[in-house]
Image: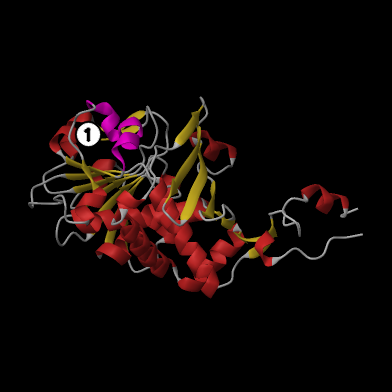
């Protein structure tokens, strides 16, 4: 005997890697980045409505595995994500992720999705959104130091959202730069391969650092950073991992997502706990100043926060209603009588 077909409530939309790629290509990468930025900005502007906590991290010598949860009055979301710098040498992704969005009213999941691609998109959208508030006026050239998996997404987000038209690329591995140049060859950007970090930042009003090694590195030294630039530091995202010389931090105005998390994981782990920082949601609401003069050095100490993932999950949940690139996953037990779970199992024989 078999059970009747489960009700629609038992199925959860699952967006696989293949369907995520189809969805992104159907909408268009730049359109996805623009719309994602709108979702993220809308959620930042209602920041006080969210439950917030630093991500729950399990660190090892090889890397880190993290859960990133948050919720508003209607939905709960979390992302599972790892960060293992050694993976690239072993043929694996440095970062992989998946996420869940659930209804607060009954606890039922309403979306399960891959988030490796989605995290790259939301990180790039967040970076460019923040730069819209902090970058020097008229900046059209960005240096990109670290040309790994995030590189092209960042370049396209800054093009779409901030009007960047030139990217200057550098990576300690020339093959990574060659890869990025090839991928960005026909997206409407002027792409310049550089042989050093110093060469890459020449003439750049925006400097993005995105390296993977899990250590206290100095990707930017103090003498490399002149007045008036915006630094988008996205590589430092766990304790003991930084990219900028401490003296840059003391010269810059620092903007962060969620201070309790950034003080543990970001560039500001190098500073005293009382060093002043500005929360980005307050800038977006006009409650705090962003860039105030042309010679100011602004620094987005980006570590990624759960609300950005929540925004991305909302975005995908909305978009698959219009573009049904998903599979119905038989994930939730749905007995006719909620008390008779055993009977449902027994009748499956």
Specify the quadrant that holds the N terminus.
bottom right
Q: Is residue 263 magenta?
A: yes
Is residue 14 positioned above or below 92 on the image? below
Q: Position of residue 189 (x, y in %)?
A: 32, 65
| For residue 240, side relative to residue 107 (left or right) | left
Q: Is residue 136 magenta?
A: no
Of helix, strand and loop, which mostly describes the magenta segment? helix
> What residue appears at the point 59 percent right and 68 percent down from the top-left corner?
325
Asked whether 51 or 117 is in front, the reply is 51
| Picture mark count | 1
Q: Position of residue 105 (x, y in %)?
A: 52, 56
Asked whether 250 or 87 is in front, the reply is 250
Where is mark 1, residue-wise?
A: 221
| For residue 308, side relative to residue 219 (left or right) | right
Asked whether 203 or 309 is in front, the reply is 309
> What residue appears at the point 43 percent right and 47 percent down from the top-left corner?
70
What coloring was used for the rendering? secondary structure
Asked whether 68 or 145 is in front, the reply is 68
Q: Position of residue 66 (x, y in %)?
A: 49, 37
> What residue appears at the point 83 percent right and 51 percent down from the top-left corner?
343
Is residue 141 positioned above or below 252 on the image? below
Decide: few, some or many residues near mark 1? Use Cα within 10 Å; few <14, some 14-19, many ≥20.
some
Q: Secondary structure at mark 1?
A: loop
> What residue appears at the point 45 percent right and 70 percent down from the top-left corner?
28
| For residue 257, side relative to residue 16 (left or right) | left
Q: Which image quarter: residue 188? A: bottom left
| For residue 276, side relative to residue 311 (left or right) | left
Residue 204 appears in view: no
The magenta region covers 258-272
């Amino acid at each position: 005997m078999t059970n009747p077909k489960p009700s629609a409530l038992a199925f959860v939309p699952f967006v696989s890697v293949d369907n995520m790629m189809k969805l992104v290509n159907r909408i268009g990468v730049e359109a996805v980045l623009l719309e994602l930025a709108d979702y993220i900005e809308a959620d930042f502007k209602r920041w006080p409505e969210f439950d917030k906590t630093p991500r729950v991290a399990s660190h090892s010598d090889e890397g880190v595995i993290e859960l990133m949860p948050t919720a508003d009055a209607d939905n709960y979301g979390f992302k599972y994500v790892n960060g293992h710098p050694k993976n690239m040498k072993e043929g694996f992704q440095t970062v992989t992720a998946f996420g869940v969005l659930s209804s607060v009213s009954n606890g039922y999941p309403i979306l399960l999705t891959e988030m490796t691609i989605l995290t790259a998109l939301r990180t790039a959208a967040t970076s460019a959104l923040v730069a819209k508030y902090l970058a020097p006026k008229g900046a059209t050239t960005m240096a990109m130091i670290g040309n790994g998996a995030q590189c092209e997404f960042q370049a396209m987000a800054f093009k779409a959202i901030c009007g960047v038209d030139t990217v200057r690329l550098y990576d300690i591995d020339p093959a990574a730069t060659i890869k990025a140049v090839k991928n960005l060859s026909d997206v409407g950007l002027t792409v310049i391969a550089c042989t050093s970090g110093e060469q890459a930042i020449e003439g750049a009003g925006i400097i993005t650092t995105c390296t993977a090694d899990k250590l206290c590195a100095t990707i930017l030294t103090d003498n490399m950073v002149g007045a008036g630039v915006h630094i988008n530091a996205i590589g430092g995202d766990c304790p003991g991992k930084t990219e900028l010389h401490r003296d840059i931090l003391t010269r810059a105005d620092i903007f962060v997502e969620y201070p309790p998390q950034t003080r543990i994981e970001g560039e500001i782990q190098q500073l005293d706990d009382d060093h002043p920082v500005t929360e980005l949601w307050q800038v977006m609401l006009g409650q705090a100043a962003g860039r105030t003069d042309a010679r100011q050095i602004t620094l987005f100490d980006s570590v990624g926060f759960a609300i950005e993932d929540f925004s991305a999950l909302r975005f995908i949940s909305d978009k698959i209603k219009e573009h049904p690139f998903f599979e119905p996953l038989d994930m939730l037990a749905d007995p006719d009588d909620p008390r008779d779970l055993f009977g449902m199992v027994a009748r499956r024989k």
